[in-house]
Image (tube, rainbow, N blue to C red):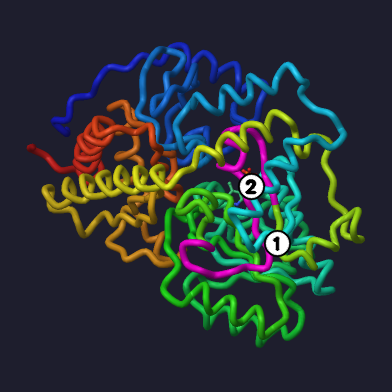
Amino acid sequence: MSPVRKRLRRTRESEALFVRAKKRMPGGVSSPVRSFASVGGQPFFVKKGRGATLIDADGNRYVDWVMSYGPLVFGHAHGPILSAVRKALPRGTSYGAPSRGEVELAERVTKIFPSMEKVRFVSSGTEAAMSAVRLARGATGRDLVLKFAGCYHGHADSFLVSAGSGLATLGIPGSPGVPSSLAGLTLTARYNDLESVEALFRAHPKRIAVIAVEPIAANMGVVAPAPGFLEGLRRIADREGAALLFDEVISGFRVAKGGAQELYGIRPDLTCLGKILGGGLPVGAYGGRADLMARIAPDGPVYQAGTLSGNPLAMAAGKAMLDSLTPAVYQKLEKTARELERGMNAAAKKLGVSDRVSINRVGSILTPFFTAGPVRNFDDAKKSDLDAFKRWFHTLIRSGVFVAPAQFEAMFVSTAHTARDVAKTVKAHEAGLKEAFGLTGS
Ligand SMILES: *Cc1c(COP(=O)(O)O)cnc(C)c1O
């Protein structure tokens, strides 16, 4: 047995809620990863979030590195976002008619992302990616979609093929319910492998409508684009007459205010946004070249609509979020993330397991892969020791540190995380590595 002391943690309230939830909701959850299905055990139910801390129904506190899977750059219940929503609330919750908030948010988004000459607001990242693909197909008159193994673009039918994240963890190769005739229109290339992209274009000349990519992959765990990879995609898309779609639902506003396209200096034809854009409220957006966006209804024939699109509370939250994203925010995120990475690597080195856990980080997102690395694509990521990950995860939870209950996800740093949060996490990480690899002694 490991000498690591297991702190007693009350779980009665969460357990009771989970029993009730499972009776009325599939898996007891509203989104699969939340169920802890891939690590075993039971999820905790959140009572409230504040800053970098989550408090569960039994009163346990966690340093939260999940941050709602990305949206919460400033942590939970950030003052300016709460005030903006509070101010908007008495004016009504939805109009079904245009309002000023949409114009103001659209002006901000198109200024921060110059490649997005026009933007359409939707209610989720899934909806953004699904709509952008319809637009690319409509504009090119082609049917095929090229995506990368391990990249996730939401759960629209065309994208549920080798889609990383929740699907990777649950081991579902696509999903029942996606017709094979439709899945057959989605081609899968290897991330960071331009030759695999060239081969698909050679095999399907003039038939590929769009190259869809996470410019920084974060749903197979964090994987940075290799030097030249995004430039190569831009070149191939131009040569082949396909649209280049950057899915910046995670990277947008996170790795730089203007996302990966600002960080790496590549201009895509289309961009998807979500997560941070809504400051924790449900917002997505897609946009891009004006001539492409002119094809969206009512300007053009490609149909896409939404009852709650441009929702006034969500627009207010988004505006407050974007206005809070100053250069100092990115400096702080980088500093905290660097210290976290450094501390976690030092713990692994101290225990002599540096060759068994490999951290990938881009700015404020990082993933410790339980494999030697380097992790450059989904095949590399899948070499991870998932049993070791499980033991590590449960040690962290017992130590009051919440990370996503799955290997193929990211840790999200916020400005609310303090040096103390980092120190507590590094300590839990060390205990977690001992559990993961069955190291005895101290
Ligand atoms: C989360 C995510 C989506 C889907 O967004 P939802 O709001 O969950 O529908 C799409 N693309 C990427 C890259 C994501 O990380």
The residue shown at (39%, 41%) is 413
Foreground pick, 242 / 173: 242
Q: Amino acid at mark 2?
A: Arg
Q: Position of residue 184 (x, y in %)?
A: 73, 68
Foreground pick, 24 / 260: 260
Residue 31, relative to residue 114: is it above or below?
above
Q: In terms of secondary structure, where does tag 2 sit?
A: helix
Q: Amino acid at mark 1?
A: Gly
Q: Position of residue 369 (x, y in %)?
A: 34, 54
Q: In terms of secondary structure, where does tag 1 sit?
A: strand
Q: Earlier in the sequence, mark 1 or mark 2?
A: 2
Residue tagged 1: 288
Task: Answer whether residue 303 is magenta in the image.
Answer: no
The residue shown at (66%, 87%) is 202
The residue shown at (34%, 38%) is 393
Foreground pick, 355 / 260: 260
Q: Position of residue 427 (x, y in %)?
A: 20, 35
Foreground pick, 215 / 73: 73
Q: Which residues are magenta?
A: 261-285
Left/right of residue 185 with respect to residue 160 in the rendered view:
right
Q: Mark 2, residues whose alpha carbon is within 10 Å: few (<14), some, or many (≥20)?
A: some
Residue tagged 2: 108
Q: Quadrant of residue 241?
A: bottom right
Disc 1 versus disc 2: nearer the observer: 2
Q: Label 1, label 2: how many angstroms apart (C-alpha)?
A: 14 Å
Residue 396, relative to residue 162: is it above or below?
above
Q: Mark 1, residues whose alpha carbon is within 10 Å: few (<14), some, or many (≥20)?
A: many
Q: Position of residue 158 (x, y in %)?
A: 72, 59
The answer to the question of whether label 1 and label 2 lie on touching residues, with beta carbons closer than 8 A, is no
Which quarter of the rendering shows the N terminus? top left
The residue shown at (50%, 42%) is 70
